[in-house]
Amino acid sequence: MKNSYFLSIENLNRDETLPLSEVLAQLAFNERGLIPVITQDVESKQVLMFAWMNRQALDQTLTTGRMTYWSRSRDELWVKGESSGHTQTLVSMAIDCDGDVLLCQVEQTGAACHTGRVDCFYLNVDRERQQVRVDKDPS
Amino acid sequence: MKNSYFLSIENLNRDETLPLSEVLAQLAFNERGLIPVITQDVESKQVLMFAWMNRQALDQTLTTGRMTYWSRSRDELWVKGESSGHTQTLVSMAIDCDGDVLLCQVEQTGAACHTGRVDCFYLNVDRERQQVRVDKDPS
């Protein structure tokens, strides 16, 4: 979706800066007040998981450095790893060109997926055989 | 969100397979009939962009091997690179544990971002300085 604020800054050159509070105020949270978050392992570059944040979860993540999402199923703040111990330490965060997605690089402790797998993307599409193949054992 | 089909298959072991048509029929498209798609460069592992597919875009991507999204702003199928030439060839696709996100590895021709940058995530959050810093020049 086009967002006039992010359109207005898309031609900035490398190393130009903007106040964080100004940019965050312009983020395109959806009709439920949520923004998609892609979480990537800073070392392996594996995409670990995909989840959502509301503004409070985002502020808490930035303040504490611990990845904090909004759980849509429990309808509450979700400090990743709070019960499992599989925490994620925020290393860096980037906002996309439209201001409607966040990409976070993290240091992952243990498994990112609730099934005990390193990441959530273990169901692989095999177009040739028209199958889906599991590519990691559960814990 | 919990999806009973994906819950029922989460303990499958590595290399077990399921029919593709069965799995695709269970994907959790949202209330607009869309599913989030994370697109990653198969070589650099950079996350290039984030977009959405409806069932038709997904089927067309799997059939043609060319990444095809649903454009929410234009409300139409969007063959990536159709006008810019910056196409994406699908190398592999994975579904997440909840069946509500797709992760695609692609070979990217040219820039993934409409600004001419390699990827869309060029606005970096600097927590210490409370700034957002542009980390790539526009084309």
Image: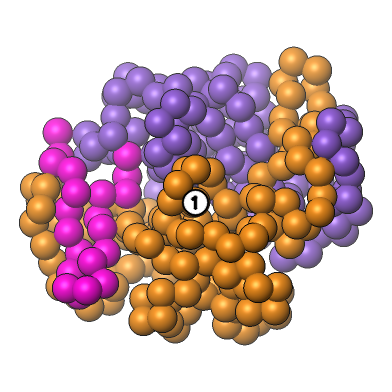
Chain colours: A orange, B purple
In which quadrant of the rendered view does residue A79 lie? bottom right
Residue at 53%, 31% (x, y): give it: B105
Could you tell me the amino acid type at mark 1? Asp
Image quadrant in which you'd find residue B87:
top left
Q: Is residue A82 above or below residue B48?
A: below
Chain of the residue on which disc 1 is drawn: A
Q: Magenta span: helix, strand or loop, mainly?
A: loop
Q: In the rendering, at what x and y percent does residue A27 appear?
A: 33, 68
Report the side of A46 relative to A132 (left or right).
Answer: left
Residue B66 x, y percent position in the rendering: 52, 21
User: Which image quarter is the C terminus of chain B in?
Assistant: top left
Q: Is residue B136 magenta?
A: yes
**Residue B4: percent from left, percent from top:** 87, 59
Q: Which residue is mark 1?
A: A41
Residue A94 among magenta residues: no
In this view, A49 is above or below A89: above
Whether residue B21 is visible to the viewer of this picture, yes or no, is no
Name the quadrant containing residue A103.
bottom left
| Label 1 Cα neighbours within 10 Å, binned few <14 / some 14-19 / many ≥20 | many
Identified at 27% across, 76% down, the residue is A25
Residue B95 placement, left or right of B82: right
State which region is magenta: B119-139
Which image quarter holds the N terminus of chain B?
bottom right
